[in-house]
């Protein structure tokens, strides 16, 4: 269970961190506010999840120990979320692919027989519903907008699609919990997620890529080279000045 | 009615504490002064996101990261709100932004200093927001209605930021010796620039007299600066930190703190573009603006197409 909660937490933390990199540099002020809003939601979700893991482990760790004192191989986020921001098209596509998955996942988790998880998911679903609406609208704008924006979104799809599959390919942890009925079977969620994506893509004059090789491993701690740099930056103070209160 | 009459009515409203509203007659110079001041304030909020944003990815705990994200987000909100207030005077947000990017418009010089350690985030909240509040509390009573109302809301959020900044400073000042050293270092670097935020001495301030007559400002630069020093000295004492001014001491007779001479050469150096980060700040804004152009164009094109499709549903079906 803890491993799974860490997967959820790390997804939220790492994507929130990436979105935080935009703060002050977005294409317009309204987007600075919106992207920061999502970063706030995700970081807040990560915090609740780490607190829950700390509680379940019961060995005196706190939320920051998980975020700031684990190394690359212990992180459980999917590869998609650690990919660099790139241009705004890359950021929005990464967000949309994640939001579509996350929305249906959290909808199902809200029905989990694990009471804590169900409550947490129901609470977070409000935020995630807004995230999906925001990223869907921007996929439509960029896909339908100008030739330039369409081409940039297409380029983002080419760069990032290979990381989209991992979200819905269950690893051992997910298979096990699905069997126990604690989390949904990802294979059963897939049609709804893909349906949402193709609906939005159609509106944006994009076609769903097919036959793309899907990279996996992030959920089991096999990451891209990017994560090390994210952690180097994020964990700097905790590593340079260990054991202090901030 | 002659313009002289208009002007007399305008001034009598001001004298009677009646707020001036967007559609009221106002002297051109009043309008221009307000547009300049409000847009400078908006630019300061937007540029001010950069030095603090510099530490978002390095915030040392999840709690601090959330606080910092929320603070920088508030600043974007204040910027938007203030540009809107300027637009009630007939200015255009895009023109104002262009003035910032081309260096024609100024923003608060304090944001041309770098954030070098984590305590800088505390020092900015405590001192920079603290100094801003002195000014902004006064502006909640400014004569132009939309500006005064914007300030009421902004002040509430700024006071919150200031308390959070001070709380961060407390964690550092009461923390390890390394943290305390960071706190002292931050205070040493931010103290004098914070005092400069109030602008030149009253005798040298070009815009002050008229602004006070029009009740845009209600207190002089030196009065505000003195209030700030008086409030802040005991706060520094509580933290056990030393303000970097050997001439600072309580003056029983005046009932105020006396403080040392401000280095106005440095002030003007930074105003004229030669602060440590002027170039980087403007370049960062230009880069965001230029890199974002295609995004804004796409949003506009999509909105137009959507509108078209609504007007001509058959044509859209045929085209599809």
Image (tube, coloured by chain):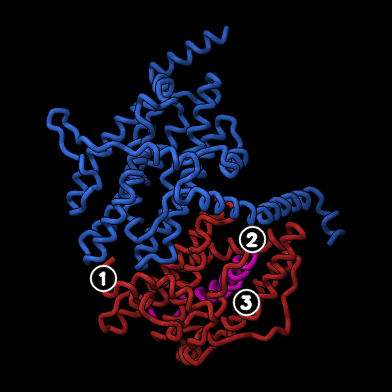
- Crowd rating for badge 3 (residues with CA inside 10 Å; few <14, some 14–19, many 20+): few
Q: Colour of chain A?
A: red
Q: Is residue B12 left or right of residue B307?
A: left
Q: Position of residue A233 (x, y in %)?
A: 44, 71
Q: Is residue B44 left or right of residue B132?
A: right
* Figure quadrant of the N terminus of chain A: bottom left
Q: Which residue is mark 1?
A: A244
* Residue farthest to the left, as pictured: B252
Task: Reply above or below: B315 against B219.
Answer: below
* Colour blue belongs to chain: B
| Distance CA(mark 3)–CA(mark 1) | 46 Å
Between A84 and A29, which is closer to the camera in this rendering?
Answer: A84
* Residue farthest to the front, as pictured: B265
Res B133 visible: no
Name which of mark 3 and mark 1 comes first in the sequence.
Answer: 3
Q: Secondary structure at mark 2?
A: helix
Q: Position of residue B51 (x, y in %)?
A: 44, 54
Name which of mark 3 and mark 2 comes first in the sequence.
Answer: 2
* Figure quadrant of the C terminus of chain A: bottom left
Task: Reply above or below: A207 against B263.
Answer: below
Q: Looking at the rendered structure, which numbered label has been put on residue A192?
A: 3
Task: Reply above or below: A192 against B108.
Answer: below
Kindly identify the residue that appears in the image at 73 percent across and 57 percent down. Answer: A145
Q: Is residue B117 left or right of residue B236?
A: right
Give the extent of the magenta segment.
A88-115
Q: Which residue is mark 2?
A: A138
Chain identifier of the residue bearing label 1 in the image: A
Name which of mark 1 and mark 2 comes first in the sequence.
Answer: 2
């Amino acid at each position: 269970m803890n491993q799974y909660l860490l997967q959820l937490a790390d997804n939220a933390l790492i994507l929130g961190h990436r979105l935080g990199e935009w703060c002050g540099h977005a294409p317009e002020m309204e987007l600075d506010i919106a992207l920061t809003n999502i970063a706030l939601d995700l970081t807040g979700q990560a915090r609740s999840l780490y607190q829950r893991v700390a509680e379940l482990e019961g060995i005196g760790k706190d939320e920051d120990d998980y975020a700031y004192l684990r190394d690359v191989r212990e992180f459980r986020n999917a590869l998609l979320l650690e990919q660099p921001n790139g241009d705004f098209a890359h950021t929005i596509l990464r967000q949309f692919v994640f939001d579509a998955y996350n929305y249906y996942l959290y909808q199902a988790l809200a029905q989990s027989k694990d009471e804590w998880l169900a409550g947490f998911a129901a609470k977070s679903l409000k935020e995630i519903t807004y995230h999906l609406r925001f990223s869907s609208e921007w996929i439509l704008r960029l896909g339908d907008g100008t030739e330039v924006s369409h081409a940039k979104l297409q380029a983002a799809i080419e760069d990032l699609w290979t990381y989209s599959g991992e979200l819905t390919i269950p690893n051992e942890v997910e298979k096990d919990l699905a069997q126990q009925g604690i989390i949904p079977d990802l294979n059963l969620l897939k049609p709804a997620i893909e349906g949402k994506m193709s609906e939005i893509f159609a509106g944006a004059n994009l076609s769903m890529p097919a036959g793309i090789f899907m990279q996996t491993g992030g959920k089991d701690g096999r990451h891209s080279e990017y994560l090390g740099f994210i952690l180097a930056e994020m964990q700097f103070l905790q590593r340079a000045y260990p054991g202090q209160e901030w | 009615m002659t313009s002289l009459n208009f002007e007399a009515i305008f001034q009598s409203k001001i004298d009677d504490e009646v707020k001036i509203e967007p559609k009221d007659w106002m002297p051109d110079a009043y309008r221009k002064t307000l547009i300049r001041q409000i847009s400078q304030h908006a630019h300061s909020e937007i540029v001010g996101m950069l030095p603090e944003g510099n530490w978002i990815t390095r915030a040392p705990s999840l709690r601090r990261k959330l606080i910092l994200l929320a603070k920088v987000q508030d600043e974007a909100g204040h910027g938007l709100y203030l540009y809107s207030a300027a637009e009630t005077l007939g200015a255009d947000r895009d023109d104002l932004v262009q003035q910032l990017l081309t260096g024609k418009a100024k923003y608060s010089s304090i944001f041309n200093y770098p954030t070098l350690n984590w305590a800088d985030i505390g020092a900015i909240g405590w001192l920079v927001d603290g100094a801003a509040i002195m000014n902004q509390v006064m502006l909640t009573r400014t004569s132009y209605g939309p500006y005064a109302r914007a300030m009421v809301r902004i002040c509430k959020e700024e006071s919150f930021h200031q308390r959070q900044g001070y709380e961060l400073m407390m964690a550092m000042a009461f923390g390890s010796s390394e943290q305390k050293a960071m706190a002292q270092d931050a205070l040493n670097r931010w103290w004098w620039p914070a005092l400069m935020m109030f602008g030149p001495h009253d005798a040298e301030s070009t815009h002050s007299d008229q602004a006070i007559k029009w009740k845009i400002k209600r207190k002089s630069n030196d009065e505000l600066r003195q209030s700030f020093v008086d409030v802040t000295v005991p706060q520094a004492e509580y933290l056990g930190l030393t303000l970097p001014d050997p001439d600072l001491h309580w003056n029983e007779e005046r009932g105020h703190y006396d403080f040392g001479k401000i280095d106005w050469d440095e002030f003007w150096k930074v105003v004229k573009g030669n602060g440590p980060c002027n170039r980087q700040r403007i370049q960062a804004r230009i880069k965001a603006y230029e890199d974002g152009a295609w995004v804004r164009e796409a949003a506009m094109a999509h909105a137009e197409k959507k509108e078209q499709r609504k007007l001509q549903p058959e044509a859209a079906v045929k085209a599809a």
